[in-house]
Amino acid sequence: MRLAAPLFTHAWLFDSLPKVLGDSQPLVCNSDGDDIVFHEVRFPIEVDITGKDIADRFAGRDDLRQENPQFWSWLGRPPAKGTARPGHPDALVAGVTMEDGTPVLGNLEIKGRFLVLMVNSAERAQRGAELVQNILGKMVRAPLTTIQTIEQLKAAHQGKKPSADDIPPEVATPLVHAMLDKQYRATLDEPVGMLGDISPRAAARTKTGRQKVAEWLKYLEMRSSSGLNPQDPMATYDFSWVWKELHVEDLRR
C-alpha cells in the first residue's frame, strides 16, 4: 500500500479536479510549493557495483527508508506546527506522506543497471541528484533526466499515447537544459570511463587526453541529438560551453 501511494494521489487528482474546476487548468504544487513536473533521473551504475553496495551506502540514513532490497523512499521533515504553506495560496497541494506524517520527497529504485530517482519537481530533482551523488560518488555515473507534465501523465492514465508536443517548449527546455548544465558541470571533475577513469579537466591537460576529451564530447553530442524529434530539449542542448570550459574547442569538427 505504501508503494502505491503516488497512484492513489494521481487517481484522486484526475477524478476530483475536473469535477471542481470544470475545464479550467488548476495550479498544482507539491508540499514544498514547487510547480509539479514529474522528473525521472537515471544514474548508470558502474560495472563493478552491485545493488548490495548501494544498499550498504544508503543504510542508516534518516532521510532514506528502505522498502525492499531495491526500493527506498526519500523522506523530508514534517513542517513545524503553525508553519505557513509554501507556494501560491490558491494552489492545490499534492503530496505523499508516511504513516507518521513524514513527507515523501521522492523514490529511489534500482532498475537493471540504473539507479532511478523519481520526484515531482525540478527543485527536488536537483536536490535528489545532489544527494545521490554525495552518497554514492564514483559508484554511479552522471545521470540523464526525463520530465513529464501533469497533462502527459493524465493522458497516459486515460490510455492516450502522450505526445512530445504536450509539453510546451518554453516549459520543458529551460528545465532540461538547467539540469543538464548542472550535471555536466559536476561531471567535469569526476572520473569518466571513456577517459581512463580520470576527470575531463585532468584529461584536458595532456595532448593525448585532449583528443580523448574531444571524442567524449562528440559522443555526448551525438547521443543527445539522436532522438526522433529535433526540437526535443535533449536534442537542442548546446555543449559549446563544455568545449570552451575544457579549452578543446579547436578540436570540435
Image (spheres, rainbow, N blue to C red):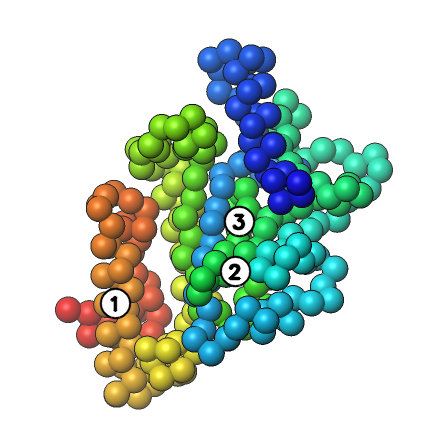
Locate residue 181, reporting x and y percent. Answer: 41, 58
> Residue, x 51% and y 11% (percent of image)?
22
Query: Tag 3: Cα neighbours inside 10 Å, few (<14), some, or many (≥20)?
Result: many
Q: For mark 3, what is the residue?
A: 118
Label 1 amino acid?
Tyr
Q: Is residue 102 left or right of residue 221?
A: right
Query: Is tag 2's residue or tag 3's residue first in the polypeptide sequence?
Result: 2
Query: Tag 2: Cα neighbours inside 10 Å, few (<14), some, or many (≥20)?
Result: many
Name the outermost residue toward the left: 253
Quarter assignment of residue 112: bottom left
Locate residue 53, reporting x and y percent. Answer: 58, 73
Query: Is tag 2's residue or tag 1's residue first in the polypeptide sequence?
Result: 2
Q: Secondary structure at mark 1?
A: helix
C-alpha gap between disc 3 and disc 1: 26 Å
Answer whether residue 13 is visible to the viewer in this image.
yes
Locate residue 209, reporting x and y percent. Answer: 29, 84
Residue 110 is tagged as: 2
Residue 219 is tagged as: 1
Label 2 amino acid?
Ile
